[in-house]
Image: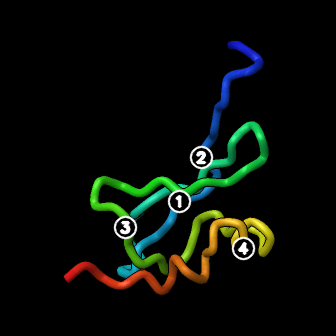
Amino acid sequence: MYENEDEAVAIANLIGADEKNVVGWVYRWNTGALAVRWDIKGPQRVSCCQPDLSDVDKREIDFDGLTRICAPS
């Protein structure tokens, strides 16, 4: 592994509005930054994350905003 390469690891599953299916993942980069990666359907409303994230991490990914994504028409 090269030290200057960016790497990320999934730290939580994003659970969809149906409260059953994983619709995305939260990744923590080796820089400390967080990022959301969606499944093939793209951004969807989220009901929770498993495991639960800290309030600081939720603010960084705008978890409140993820719970308000409008369903595709």
Alpha carbon separation for disc pair 3 and 2: 16 Å
Q: Residues within 10 Å of mark 4 (few under 14, many from 20)?
A: few
Q: Position of residue 53 (x, y in %)?
A: 71, 67
Residue occupied by mark 1 = 13
Of tags 4 and 1, the one toward the viewer is 4
Residue occupied by mark 3 = 21
Mark 2 vs 1: CB contact within 8 A? yes
Q: Earlier in the sequence, mark 2 or mark 4?
A: 2
Would you place residue 16 above or below residue 27 in this image?
below
Instruction: Write the residue at 51% across / 76% down.
Output: 66
Q: Earlier in the sequence, mark 4 or mark 1?
A: 1
Alpha carbon separation for disc pair 3 and 1: 9 Å
Q: Earlier in the sequence, mark 3 or mark 1?
A: 1
Amino acid carrying mark 4 in the image = Arg
Mark 3 vs 4: CB contact within 8 A? no
Q: Position of residue 3 (x, y in %)?
A: 77, 18
Instruction: Write the residue at 74% across / 65% down.
Output: 57
Residue occupied by mark 2 = 10
Alpha carbon separation for disc pair 2 and 4: 17 Å
Amino acid carrying mark 1 in the image = Asn
Residue 13 is left or right of residue 60, and the answer is: left
Q: Position of residue 19 (x, y in %)?
A: 42, 78
Q: Which mark is residue 59?
A: 4
Would you place residue 60 above or below residue 6 in this image?
below
Would you place residue 52 above or below residue 41 in this image?
below
Q: Earlier in the sequence, mark 3 or mark 2?
A: 2
Alpha carbon separation for disc pair 4 and 1: 16 Å
Instruction: Write the residue at 41% across / 74% down.
Output: 16
Alpha carbon separation for disc pair 3 and 4: 22 Å
Q: Quadrant of the C terminus?
A: bottom left
Q: Which residue is more in the foreground, 29 or 20?
A: 29
Mark 2 vs 4: CB contact within 8 A? no
